[in-house]
Image (cartoon, helix red, strand yellow):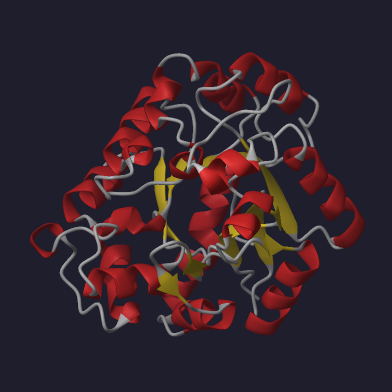
Amino acid sequence: MTLLYDVHTHVGLDQAFYLRGWWPYAATAQDLLQHLDACGIARAVCFPMTMPSAFDPYAFIDRQEVELLPGRIPFDRENALLVQELERVDTERRLLPFAMFDPSRLVTEQLRNLEKLVGKIKGLKTQTTIIESPIRSLLDEGKELMAFAEQHELPVLLHATVNPQAVCAQASDCLAVAEAFPGVRFCLAHSLGFHKQLLLTAAGMTNVWIDSASLLAHCQLALGGSLIATVPAQRVDADYRRPVQVMTAIYEMLDGCYLWGSDNPFMSWFDDELKIMYSYRQEAEILHALPESVRKEMGSLAPRRWLYGENAGEP
């Protein structure tokens, strides 16, 4: 039987989101395992929420500013708490914990904390839009984080966007980082906003995979003309009213390097402007609607190659 993977989920609590009135703001490992069981998914990559407790929640709420609290280090508590939660709850070890990192702030101190988790974490993840930390920092002051990933053979997942207002996580910059570190296996999130040329560039790189996280939301945004999705002239040619067709078109472009991810719980997103509601089941239905060979590649074989390397073999 093919074991299906979800390569993009969050577990934890985001106090700043909650107090600002954003939703969702929390998800537990037990929640995630129940979603997997209900939707025929065997395993999932998971990582903490995006705004950690090291940042001042009231600066984020009242002034829309990102400020590190005195004496704190990004994700200094959340990464260890995620590992602890999985050790308690995930008795069958179906969830693969990734540690979150900040590319530019207190890198040396972050590395000290990450060293303590070697052997327990299975990869690294960053979402640089929310914490306002440029992904290009990995090319200079944050490069030791990628050296750490390569040393410990940890795959890395980068939030990627084509929204010109989200300057810290541009998909083109994520591709530049991946090119600079050929010994690291990267996954770039959210179908690169359906940008055809960037997807073709990724397809030509041997150390890059792309995930489909929150595909339904991104199709809705594309139909609504949002800047989060590429403008039509540069977009993958597909009917965005039919997400299965969109996923199939991108799969054919990426030649075995497209991975299924739900983005749980952020397949839904309510903030100061957006109001998007989808469920885990709806995301999983897209995966299950694919032809069997495509589902097996996106949900099992390709995720294993990204997670474990080309010699991962078939589950």
Q: Residue 240: horizontal and vertical position, in percent?
A: 25, 77
Q: Is residue 277 above or below residue 101?
A: below
Looking at the rendered image, the quarter that the N terminus falls into is bottom right
Q: Is residue 31 visible?
A: yes
In front of the other: 233 or 93: 233
Residue at 72% across, 79% down? 37
Locate residue 121: give its quadrant.
top right
Measured from the top left, where is residue 168 in percent x and y?
A: 37, 36
Q: Residue furthest left?
A: 233
Instruction: Please give the name of the residue rendered at 68% of the width and 76% of the height, measured from the top-left corner.
Output: 35
220 horizontally vs 84: left or right: left
Given the current orientation, which residue lies at the most extreme front position?
Answer: 62
Residue 267 visible (yes or no) = no
How many discs appear?
0
Question: Which quadrant is the C terminus positioned in?
Answer: bottom right
Say which residue appears at 43% left-offset and 52% top-offset. 189
- Compared with residue 276, is residue 162 higher up or lower down, i.e. above or below? above
The x, y position of residue 279, in whole percent, is 55, 79
- The quadrant in which residue 177 appears is top left
Indicate the quadrant where residue 169 lies. Answer: top left
Q: Residue sitting at 61 percent across and 18 percent down?
A: 106
Q: Is residue 235 left or right of residue 250?
A: left
- Please give left or right for residue 240 compared with residue 300 in the image: left
Taking depth in this image into account, of 192 and 256 the one nearest to the observer is 192
**Picture coordinates of residue 22 (x, y %)?**
55, 62
